[in-house]
Amino acid sequence: MIISKASTMRHRELIIAVVLFMGLVVFGQSLEVSPVTHMLVLLPGLAISGALLGIGLRVDRIQIDEANANGVILIAVGFIFFWMLPRYIDASLVTVTFGILKYLSIPIFVGVLMALGWGRANPYLRGFLKANALSMLGVLSFLYTHAPVRICNSYLVSAQENLGVAFLWTAIFLALVWSYPLFFPKASRSVLRQ
C-alpha cells in the first residue's frame, strides 16, 4: 500500500499539533510564571498548535469565498484582542474556568480559523492586520514600560517592564520578517519553494 506524500504531511502536522498542545498544557504553569513567556510563548504556541491542527485536518479544502474568509479572520482577531486584555490574562491565572477557556479558545478560534481564512482573505486585510499588529505591539511596549501602576495584577511592575521590552523586540522582528519579501522578492520566492 502506497501512502501519498500529502497524507504523510497531514499526519505529521496533526502529530506536531497534538504534541505541541500537550507540551503547552504540561508546561503551561511554568510559562505563566513570567508575563513574557505567557504572552509571547504560551499564547502564540496555542494558536500555532491550532493552526497546525487546522492544516492537518485540511480546513483549507473547505470551500469559502474571500468575503467569508475576511469574516473568519476578523473573528480570530477578536479572540486575539480578547486575550490581549490584562483583565482576562489575570482571570486565566486565578480561575480554572478562564484557564480552560484560554487553552480551548485560542487553538480553535484563533489557530484553526487563521488556517481556514488567512490564505483566502483579501491581501489588503492581511496587510492591514500586519501593520496593526506592529503598531499595537509598539503601543503595548510603551504602555507596559511607562505605566506607573501594575497593569496585570498577577505580575510585578519589573516583570511588566520586561514584557514591554519584549513587545518592542517582537515588533522589530516581525517588521523585518514581513518586510523581507518587499526588498528581496526573488530570494523569498526561492526559499518558499524549497
Image (tube, rainbow, N blue to C red):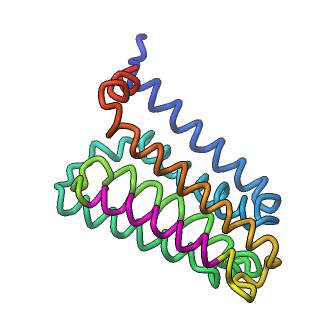
Residue 178, placed above or below residue 158: above
Q: Position of residue 193 (x, y in %)?
A: 35, 22
When asked about the image quadrant of residue 151, the answer is bottom right
Q: Nearer the viewer, residue 158 or 96?
A: 158
Whether residue 2 is in magenta: the answer is no
Q: Is residue 65 above or below residue 57?
A: below
The residue closer to the viewer here, 5 or 45, is 45
Q: Residue at x 33, y 68 (%)?
A: 74
Q: Residue at x 31, y 62 (%)?
A: 128
The residue depicted at 70 percent of the width and 53 percent of the height is: 24
Decide which of 121, 182 is in the foreground and name it: 182
Q: Quadrant of the N terminus?
A: top left
- Can you tell which quarter of the image residue 104 is in? bottom right
Above or below 177: residue 26: below
The span shown in magenta is: 125-143
Write down the quadrant of residue 129 in the picture. bottom left
- Classified by dominant secondary structure, the portion drawn in magenta counts as helix
- Residue at the extreme bottom: 149
**Left or right: where does residue 10 sit relative to residue 17?**
left
Q: Is residue 70 left or right of residue 151?
A: left
Is residue 140 magenta-colored? yes
Query: How far across and down, in percent of the image, does residue 181 sit?
Result: 35, 37
> Disc count in the image?
0
193 over 20 or under it: above or below: above
